[in-house]
Image: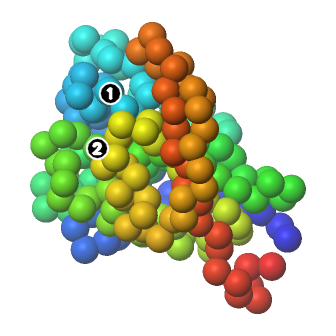
Amino acid sequence: MTMRAFDPHVTIHTKRLLLRYMEEADTHDIFQNINHDPEVLRFFIDKYVEKEEDMTLGRTIAYCLEAKRYLFAIVLKETGETIGMLLECSTPTDVFPNVEIGFAIGKPHWNQGYVTEAVQAVVPFLFKQGVHRITASHIVENEASGKVMRKCGMAYQGRHDEEVFYHGTYHDLDWYYLLAPTHPDNH
């Protein structure tokens, strides 16, 4: 099997969302919705940023482009606001055609189904790209992320004790996965 042709110009449309590659112009919205909100960062492993001018979104974008990882901005069609992100935390290869995904969304947009809608749109895209297995995990106390994973059809794989050291303590992670549907064009 040949791995995908990475294309950062891809745009995915859903009923309410536009998913496109993150841009430096998203810095303000990402600062407001994610990196300047301690409640969001309670479970999304990233740095709290006090001042917007200290944001390093440009470096993150450059790293993901170089690593050929998708870093989708979750944009509300109605307002054009970037309310969150959905990213590949790993790069698929011919030998390991798997990716881990992660996501975060601003607190004003919690519990409205936006992350579920974004994941449900990105999963088939990744499978068409040749990805065979998609994994995701969440800090055990973040049950809302587990709910998203289950709504998207991901199967529970198990708990990894003390897998991540964050905010000065070790946290257990619950892991989920989804396998590509078996189609002749996937192999």
Occupied quadrant, residue 162: top right
Mark sitting on residue 115: none
Residue nearest the observer in this picture, 65 or 123: 123
Residue nearest the observer in this picture, 113 or 70: 113
Q: Is residue 88 visible?
A: no
Q: Looking at the picture, does residue 28 appear above or below residue 2?
A: above
Q: Is 53 left, or right, of 88 in this rendering?
A: left
Picture coordinates of residue 148, whole percent (x, y): 36, 58
Q: Which colour scheme is used?
A: rainbow
For label 1, the residue is 41
Q: Which amino acid does label 2 sit on?
A: Ile
- For mark 1, give the secondary structure: helix
Q: Is 5 left, or right, of 142 in this rendering?
A: right
Q: In which quarter of the image is the C terminus?
A: bottom right
Mark sitting on residue 105: 2
Q: What residue type is labelled 1?
A: Leu
Residue nearest the observer in this picture, 35 or 142: 142
Picture residue at 86% right of the left edge, 56% below the top: 95
Q: Is 133 left, or right, of 176 in this rendering?
A: right
Occupied quadrant, residue 133: bottom right
Crowdedness of circle 1 by 10 Å Cα count: few (<14), some, many (20+)?
some
Q: Can residue 38 be seen in this view?
A: yes
Q: Report the mark closest to the observer, 2 or 1.
A: 1
Picture residue at 26% right of the left edge, 18% below the top: 52
Picture residue at 64% right of the left edge, 80% below the top: 181
The Cα–Cα distance between marks 2 and 1, rounded to whole angstroms, is 10 Å
Q: In which quarter of the image is the N terminus?
A: bottom right
Picture residue at 28% right of the left edge, 44% below the top: 105
Picture coordinates of residue 9, whole percent (x, y): 50, 57
User: Of marks 2 and 1, which one's residue comes earlier in the chain?
Assistant: 1
- For mark 2, give the secondary structure: strand
